[in-house]
Image (tube, rainbow, N blue to C red):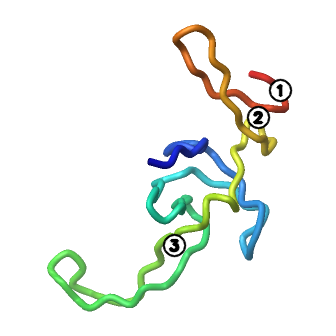
Amino acid sequence: MKKFKIKSGDTVKVIAGDHKGTEGKVLQIIKDKDRVLVEGVNLVSKHTKPSAQNPQGGIVKKEASLHISNVMLVEDGVAVRVGYQVDGDTKSRISKKTKK
């Protein structure tokens, strides 16, 4: 099982690709494909047929996934690398830059 240093709900910054520099909240982590869904980033248009939930049908904008290596955790407005610190029985996630 893979372990990622980014969790759902974290604020991240895109550091590579077409959406470089944009920030958003992590909606979902897709572990088996090493990908992440970020709110408001990498929007794609999906054509939908009319249905009971969407009687109008049409074009819907939704987020597509990014590779997890293309995002960095944001702490106090600055993108930081993340590490772990073990104190006895507790393991906490810390910023490598600020050590907090």
Q: Residue at x 62, y 11 (%)?
A: 87
Classed neighbour count for the residue bearing mark 1: other residues with Cα under 10 Å, few (<14), some (14–19), many (≥20)? few
Q: Nearer the viewer, mark 3 or mark 2?
A: 3
Q: Secondary structure at mark 2?
A: loop
Q: Which residue is mark 1?
A: 98
Q: Tell me, yes or no, whether the two marked residues, 1 and 2, touch with CB atoms within 8 Å.
A: yes
Which residue: 74% across, 21% down? Answer: 100
The numbered dot on residue 64 is 3
- Which amino acid, mark 3? Ala
Q: Earlier in the sequence, mark 1 or mark 2?
A: 2
Q: Residue 76: which numbered mark, if any?
A: 2
The residue tagged with tag 1: helix, strand or loop? loop
Q: Is residue 5 left or right of residue 17?
A: left
Foreground tag (1 vs 2): 1
Residue shown at 75% from the left, 31% from the top: 95
| Residue 8 numbered mark, or none | none
In the foreground, 97 or 46:
97
Among numbered discs 3 and 1, the one appearing first in the sequence: 3
Disc 1 marks a residue whose amino acid type is Thr
Give the residue at x 53% y 68%.
65
Q: Is residue 74 above or below residue 89?
A: below
Disc 3 vs disc 1: Cβ atoms closer than 8 Å?
A: no
Q: What amino acid is found at the position of numbered circle 2 in the picture?
A: Asp
